[in-house]
Image: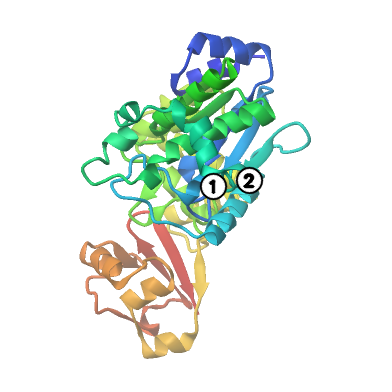
Amino acid sequence: MQNVFDVLKERGYIDQATYEEDLRELLGKESVPFYIGFDATADSLTLGHFLQIMVMMHMQKHGHKPIALLGGGTTMIGDPSGKADMRKVMTKEIIDYNASRFREQLGHFLDFSEGKAIIVNNADWLLDLNFVNFMREIGVHFSVNRMLTFDCYKNRMEQGLTFFEFGYMLMQSYDFLHLYRNHKCKLQLGGSDQWSNMLGGYELVRKLEQDKVYSMTFKLLTTAAGIKMGKTEAGTIWLDPEKTPPYELYQYMRNVDDRDVEKFLALLTFLPMDEVRRLGALEGSEINKAKEVLAFEVTKMIHGEEEASKAQQAARALFAGGMEEGSIPFTEMDKAIFEKGIGILDLLKELELTKSNGEGRRLVEQGGITIDDVKVDSIDKQVTLDDFKDGKIMIRKGKKVYHQVRI
């Protein structure tokens, strides 16, 4: 079997690794327990997390053992990496709920049967730590001077950095030590923005346990334009179908930049690399075939083949101008609402296409809202029965988000 390190490298995942040759050799000769941490900051994983899940699936397929670490403890502080301000402090109840949702979603992608993978929650060992004992065992190994050179802290010095957040790296590092001691974990994986945090844990385990462990980061999921993948004007692309319906995910992937097609096929699907390169080399209008493959494969992996097929059929019908919209998101509303009339801003909020009147106003003023392909040109627009054809209207937000209203 091919070494998973070579697979990850060929497909473009790997950014940095400690002792790269030694790690490759280890991955080629034994089953390695490894972990990735997921701080429970929302009630669903995102498309950005899906890149990390893909890495875990590749590793598991090659015989390695995933440890999915839910950050029930670390989320109590919040990672300062990449943040201009301190994260909003969340209640334990919300964090616990979010972690339970992550646990459920991860079960769709990884095999958690006996001996194949485990899920753990760092709340189980972080929340009851004795502060003085922790500082005596762990804190003594961290240089404040060195920590302040890391980007995750250095970028916050002008705005102000609390001791509360300063402890995050110590807690994340302790996670690696705990997983090494209790689950023989030898490798931590994560996004490239986690490199400094991960080095802390890697060095701590090597120092205290006198054993070889490793850290490896993979590139963040970004577009050719340098934008974080999965972030749109409408918000985040979630793995929860209630938050981002399969059709919206399909359309999002179907509309990626031509320059990103080969990269995303390699990172977000299991298609063989020969096929990835063939599809990525298509030019002109032919590249749309590759985009359809990308959209279908990603939607299939996240929501299943049936939902992917429905989304593809709906997208093709819409593109062809047909009215068989299939799985396009829709809301049934009381006819009486439209007999009286409802303001477009209120309707957008009711359909959860916008979160506020301010967001709706900006979209309308920028020409970003259409009803049955007719641009809404006034924020005072009243949507009435006159707008409906055959008991339905199609609202489009931007270029990619569709929502049908039926009465």
Q: Position of residue 53 (x, y in %)?
A: 56, 36
Label 1 residue SS: loop
Label 2 residue SS: helix
Q: Position of residue 215 (x, y in %)?
A: 50, 23
Mark 1, residue position: 73
Q: Quadrant of residue 253?
A: top left
Q: Quadrant of residue 302?
A: top right
Is residue 293 visible in the rendered structure shown here? no
Q: Position of residue 111 (x, y in %)?
A: 71, 37
Density class for disc 1 (Cα within 10 Å; few <14, some 14-19, many ≥20) is many
The label shown at residue 84 is none
Mark 2, residue position: 124
The structure residue drawn at horizontal position 48% and vertical position 36%, both measured from the top left corner, is 135
The answer to whether residue 291 is left or right of residue 271 is left
Of the pair 278 and 329, the residue shown nearer to us: 329
Q: Position of residue 179 (x, y in %)?
A: 62, 31
Determine whether 60 is above or below 88 in the image. above
Q: What is the CA distance from the residue labelled 2 to the residue labelled 1?
A: 8 Å
How many numbered badges does the structure rendering display? Answer: 2
- Name the amino acid, label 2: Asp
Is residue 106 visible in the rendered structure shown here? yes
Q: Quadrant of residue 263?
A: top left
Q: What sort of colour scheme is used for the picture? A: rainbow
Q: Residue furthest right?
A: 114
- The reply to whether callout 2 and callout 1 are in contact (CB within 8 Å) is yes
The answer to whether residue 145 is left or right of residue 75 is left
Density class for disc 2 (Cα within 10 Å; few <14, some 14-19, many ≥20) is few
Query: In which quadrant will I find the N terminus?
Result: top right
Of the pair 174 and 274, the residue shown nearer to us: 174
Q: Earlier in the sequence, mark 2 or mark 1?
A: 1
- Name the amino acid, label 1: Gly
